[in-house]
Amino acid sequence: MPFNPKTILTSFAVFTLVACGAPAENSGSSSSSNTSSSMNLPALSVTQSRQEARQVFGYIDTASQGASAAYGGYANGCVAGAEQLAETGPTWQAMRLSRNRNWAHPETVDFVQDLSREVARSTSWAGIYVGDMSQPRGGPMLSGHRSHQSGLDADIWLRPARDLSLSRDDRENISSISMRRSSGAYVNSEWTEDHWRVVRAAARDPRVARIFIFPGAKVWMCDNETGDRSYLRNIRPWYGHHYHFHVRLSCPAGSRGCQDQDAPPRGDGCDEAREWVSNILSPPPPDPNAPPPAPRRELTMGDLPRQCAALVQG
């Protein structure tokens, strides 16, 4: 039988009507637990709890009504009352519009707009090209990211935004530009000081918990920063991330049920980044006793915070 997303959504209708039409307000102290804001939500049935969450959230094309709130973690959550980043603004354009991933918690939308204005002011770029943020209600996606679920992640393209009048078709076909050389050990000739200024501006924002970018870029910044180095702590090396860098915000103030990113280790993280580079250039031998990686399991509705089921229809 072919998959019908309406069947899955309908199966949650009774649950949602009982649970509540709008999510809990985004108030109270920030917490890594969702217990206090989910106590009054009924449990899912066995059938509901086993449904793949991506097959539910991946077919919802509008945000929920009510107060904005980030629930759960970055890779195991959802977002209520999401805001859609305008397709085009004075200093930004949202890319790959067909994906419908230009939604996020309002604090993330504010951050993106603020960053775009700072980039236009302090670099030769006209602003920024914004890649994936979240789906209208967050949650797991049908393809791509494991994170970007709670409305607090955003990808910023490393292609300099020179033209902010790109059509929808342009934005489906244009590609970002890779900044890496030697598998990410170094930056390539496309990297400029303006790229550094863009990433630095993002990392200095107090709302930011992490910036993920390829190791060679982090080491370049470590080697070239001669002033305040405190922002480097927020920038961490990670696989890929040479066409864009990934911004992750902390849970908004007063969040309940939002799981924050752990604080980064002390220091500027430059030694760690140099170790990544060393391992790229001279890979350590594989551990013969290492267990095989566990097979990837798709998240089910039962894996997500209980507030997320109440967002499926609302």
Image (cartoon, rainbow, N blue to C red):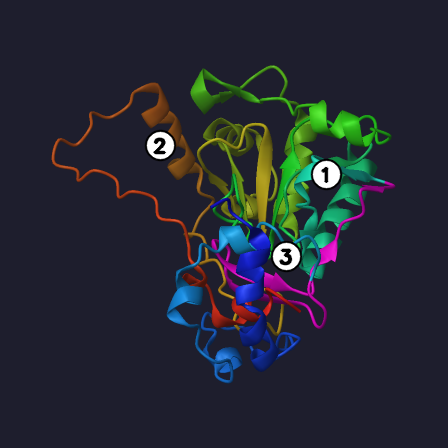
Q: Is residue 68 magenta?
A: yes
| Residue marked by disc 3 | 206
Q: Amino acid at mark 3?
A: Pro
Residue 266 is situated, as x and y percent measured from the top left of the image, at 42, 52
Examine the rendering and report whether any part of residue 130 can be seen.
no
Q: Nearer the viewer, mark 3 or mark 1?
A: 1
Q: Amino acid at mark 2?
A: Glu
Q: Is residue 284 magenta?
A: no
Viewer-proximal residue among 279 and 303: 303
- 19 w.r.t. 143: above or below: below
| Residue marked by disc 2 | 275
Q: Tell me how far mark 3 sits from mark 1, CA to CA.
A: 28 Å
| Image quarter of the C terminus | bottom right
Q: Tell me how far mark 2 sits from mark 3, CA to CA.
A: 27 Å
Residue 219 is situated, as x and y percent measured from the top left of the image, at 48, 30
Q: Amino acid at mark 1?
A: Leu
Examine the rendering and report whether any part of residue 147 can be seen.
yes
Q: Tell me how far mark 1 sits from mark 2, CA to CA.
A: 37 Å
In this rendering, position of residue 271 left or right of residue 57: left
Magenta span of residues: 64-90
Residue 181 is situated, as x and y percent measured from the top left of the image, at 50, 17
| Residue marked by disc 1 | 97
Secondary structure beneath dot 3 equals: loop
| Number of other residues with Cα within 10 Å of mark 2, as a class: few under 14, some 14 to 19, many 20 or more | few
In this rendering, position of residue 263 left or right of residue 7: left
Q: Residue at x 51, y 29 (%)?
A: 223
Viewer-proximal residue among 41 and 242: 41
The image quadrant that residue 238 belongs to is top left
| Number of other residues with Cα within 10 Å of mark 1, as a class: few under 14, some 14 to 19, many 20 or more | some
Viewer-proximal residue among 245 and 233: 245
Disc on res. 288: none
- 208 w.r.t. 169: above or below: below
